[in-house]
Amino acid sequence: MPHTLFIADLHLSPGRPDITAAFLAFMETEASKADALYVLGDLFEFWVGDDEPSELNRQVAAAFRACRAPVYYIHGNRDFMIGRRFAAEANMTLLPEHKVIDLYGTATLIMHGDTLCIDDAGYQRYRRITRLRWLQWLFLRLPLTKRLGIADGIRGKSAEAKQDKSITIMDVNQGEVERQMRKAGVQRLIHGHTHRPAIHNLELNGRPARRIVLGDWYTQGSVLRVTPERVELQSRELEESK
């Protein structure tokens, strides 16, 4: 049966080989059978440049290259500096941060989802700064070891900041969800980022609408499977949890 797959927020890193193993198994056994695979950001825990010669990066690129289905990628808040060099190595297509696709006849807005969390003013300020092209240009010209050290520091500060924020602030703003859906002219939205897998039914422009949230892969794999008839939010076990 025709179907399209969506994943996000795997946060792949050398410290979680169980997630990497689950991802590679998913790519080998499921992804190639799909019409397309969409990765909606934060596939990696961090990204300091396409020139990082890590074994993990090579494994992921090889898995994407071997996939018989086309792979599309939207940057997340952890891997927003993945560039054209890695995309070419992985044979994947980079998409803009907000993209409307025709999903079996239904116009669907896809994104990572962090732009919906407008109540987290501190994060949105950080996001605007880190997306400055000139700042990224300077960062990528630092020695690789320096960039890795900066990434470690940022992750540590991010974890501390989250401890002081309420869950409500870090979740999406419903008004912003509706605004972006209206702007895109859609009744369906798919995103990740919040790590709260769910299918939310709402009313938009007097008609039924849906917001589908992908889960993370910290304790289980979260996969959205869309067919012409059905939308299924599924989970996959990690090796550790078997």
Image (cartoon, rainbow, N blue to C red):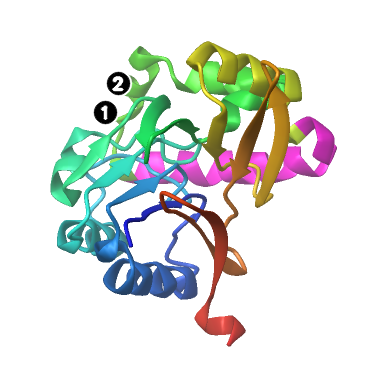
Q: Is residue 151 part of the magenta span, yes or no?
A: yes
Residue visible at 59% across and 22% down? 126
Left or right of 114, for residue 134: left
- The tag on residue 137 is 2
User: Is most of the magenta stretch helix, strand or loop?
Assistant: helix
Q: Is residue 179 above or below residue 69?
A: above
Task: Confirm or deny contact between disc 1 and disc 2 (CB under 8 A).
Answer: yes
- The tag on residue 105 is none
Q: Is residue 169 above or below residue 235?
A: above
Residue 73: horizontal and vertical position, in percent? 33, 40
- Mark 2 crowdedness (10 Å alpha carbons): few <14, some 14-19, many ≥20: few
Q: Is residue 160 part of the magenta span, yes or no?
A: yes
Magenta residues, start to end: 145-169
Check disc 1 and report its element: helix, strand or loop.
Answer: loop
The residue that disc 1 covers is 141
Residue type, label 2: Trp
Residue 15: horizontal and vertical position, in percent? 49, 68
Quarter holding the C terminus is bottom right
Residue visible at 59% across and 31% down? 114
Q: Nearer the viewer, residue 40 or 107?
A: 107
Quarter holding the N terminus is bottom left
Left or right of 63, for residue 223: right
